[in-house]
Structures are given as C-alpha cells and as structure tokens.
Image (tube, rainbow, N blue to C red):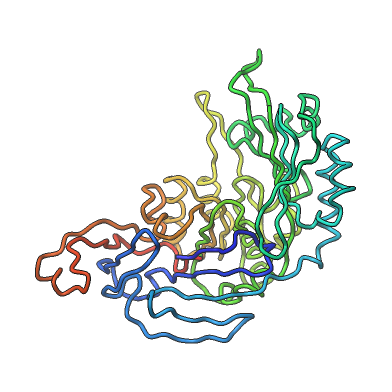
Amino acid sequence: MCKLVPSSVRFVTWTILCWIVAAYQGGGYEQRMSVDSRGRGGRGRGGYGGDRGGYNNARGAGSYRRDDRQPGRILRTWDVPSMRSRDEQNLRELETLLLQLPAPVRARLQEQYSDKLRDLNEIYLQLGRWPEAVFANPHTGQLYREPLAQVNCEQSDIALFAEMFSKTHTGSLLATRRIGIDGTLHRLSVILSHRTNSEGVPSVIGVTARVGKTVEGTLDSLAPDLLQCTGSVLLIGRPNSGKTTCLREFARRLSEDKNQIVVVVDKTCEIGGDGIVPHPAIGNARWLPVETLKKDGQMFNLQHERMREAVENQSPHVVIVDEISSATEVEAIRTMSQRGIRIIAAVHGGTLPMLLHDPDRAALTGGCHTVLLSGEEANRRKDKQKSVLMRMHEPMFQMAV
C-alpha cells in the first residue's frame, strides 16, 4: 500500500508509504494476508507483510526504513524538485488558459495574485456563485480558496469557454464532462445542467479549470528506484495527488532509452495534452489518444480497445495508462501483463486495502477472498482469527505506490 502525503507534487516534502505488492514477497497463489481498514498488513505465510528482515538503502535523495511494528511497509521521505526549469513554459501555457476567463476575473488574478501564479491549482466558475481560485501552499501543500470577484458569475462568463465546447468535443464532453486545451496540460471539467436544449444537449452551467504543469525531475528526486526496476508499477492516490504528473515523467524518462518502445494510452488526454500533437512533457513516448464512441444513445470510452491496440500494433516494452476504472480496462491490463509488457498505471484510491475491496479493480493486485480456518490453525495464530483474507491469483503489478 502506498500513500502520498500530502497530496500534490508541488509540496516541498512528500512522504510516500510504499507497500511492495505480494509478488515481491515470493510464493504462489495460496499465500495468505491480513489487511485491516487502517492499511496494516498482518504476518502470514509469504503474503503481505511477511516475516522478512529489514534493510536500509541510501540510494537517491532519501533512505528506506522498514517499520518493524507494521511489517510490509517501507517509509521514505524525499524533497520535491523545483519547477523553475519549466517556469517559462508553464507560465506561457497558463496565459492560454487565462485568456478564456472573464476580463475582471483575469485582471484580479494577474494583479493581486501575480506572485502566486506558480501555485495556482484550479479556477472555478459557476452560475450564481463568486468565481474563485484554488492555490496550493508551497510549504505545506494545503489547498486554499481565494475569491476572484465579489459578483456572481453570469451566463456570459461561462459562454467565454464556448469555443472549447465545440461540436468536435461533444462526444468527449458528454462522456467524461472534461476536455483539454490544445497545446497545454490544462483540463476543463464542466458542470452540465439537468435540462437540455432543443437539440437534446445539456447547457454548461459551471467550469472548473485545473492548471496543468510540467515538473521534470520528479521521479529522479522522489523515487529513482521506480525508474530502475523492471516490474510493473501501480500508482494509487486520491484525485489531485500528482499521479498523472508522475506518469508524464515516467513517459519522458523511460522513452530516453533507445532500446525500448514506450506507449502512452491517454484516456482523457491529460498525459499528452488535448491537441493532435503530443505535449513535449512525455518526451519521445508514442501517444495513443482515446476517443469516445456513441452507441444506442450512450457514450463509451474506448481505453481498453486502445490498450489492446497498443500491444498488437506498437510492439511496446512499456505501456503507460491513466485512470483504470472499469472491469474491461482491468481485463486489458491482464492481457498486457500476460504478454510480458511492463505497465505503469494509475488508479484512484486512498489506500491499497481500499483497492483490494473494490470489486471491479481488485484483480489488479491479485484480488482477495475470505477463508475460514480450522480451530487448530486459528489457535496457532497470535490474533486467533478464524477468518483471513487470501490472495486469489498473482497480481498484475509487482509494485504499488
């Protein structure tokens, strides 16, 4: 189990709790594990939290320390790299976003918060509400809101984004309610009315603009071991915890190796941007944007199809995928893992135990089910438990962060 604390790559210090998934512990399918709601791994026969000795590792910017009181956990603290090397590019892309804002909102943001633009995280507009900006404290990472005007947003303010919500984006907009801005890493999430117009399309009543930034050197400073390992890596984190930023850096760094092919399957066009040319932040990785299909009046995201296409048509060594959320996408991950392809993927979640108990995504980490022990076996356990969790099959990832 891994936990990112606090929840943004812009924080001065990150604490990451890494749980090496059971495949690194060795053993077969019938390994037992015990995980409670707080994420603790109980001692078992080679499963999560097995009785292996501790070790220290001084590589990279931090050091490992095994917590003997909570076996299976590795605690490491890093300093987050500076974004200064890409400030010029980030500010140029931010200007593209600001040009879409109402003039009074843009002026207030540029005049009163000019020294905080580097920490800008979101801009929020909704009919009948004050527009506001969300910043991240550069020292603690705590998010806080600031009003951008003391007047309510009107339909004319929202209409300034109308060009981005063109017919070319209709399918994507209705399926995910978010689009990107061409040439940038920004993402626009829309709030749609429950009412529709004469064409059956709901009107936009609110917009949340998430500010995307290029942060190079993230993995080299935070977790160089993730770049050096050869196994698949699963990033688990809450929304806005920096998963997509890490995926971009994986793509850039791994694609520097001329001996391997790296393919990015971009579900919402956040990793490589929303244009027809991939953003330079992903380096030389191949980029497969995912489209949305309309069938029987419903919208379907085709990420699982593009994942299979990547295997069949691109002959990749590494496939990078964001937001694994459905059973069909999990099955596509299984297909790739069985073909010897290294996978770097991200999922929403707070802890590894939360993922283990998700019926659609539990298979990513091997899945689990409850097994009843005999009285004799239960008595041999320190906790005397009669029911334990057993891993159902080998996990598709060798490491979870």
| Residue 365, position as x, y percentages in the image | 40, 60
User: What is the number of callouts on the image?
Assistant: 0
Question: Residue at 72% of width from left, 52% of height from top?
Answer: 135
Q: Classify residue 214 by image quadrant.
A: bottom right
Q: Is residue 336 left or right of residue 97?
A: left
Q: Is residue 362 left or right of residue 59?
A: left
| Residue 333, position as x, y percentages in the image | 46, 55
| Residue 123, position as x, y percentages in the image | 74, 43
- In the image, residue 116 sits, relative to residue 45, either above or below, namely above
Q: Residue furthest front?
A: 150
Question: Residue at 47% of width from left, 75% of height from top?
Answer: 74
Out of 100 and 336, give the one closest to the viewer.
100
- In the image, residue 260 sits, relative to residue 88, either above or below, namely below
Locate the N terminus and report the quarter of the image it occupies: bottom left
- In the image, residue 48 sits, relative to residue 146, either above or below, namely below
Out of 278 and 186, give the one closest to the viewer.
186
- In the image, residue 393 sits, relative to residue 300, either above or below, namely below
Q: Is residue 399 left or right of residue 202?
A: left
Q: Is residue 87 left or right of residue 195?
A: right
| Residue 227, position as x, y percentages in the image | 59, 73
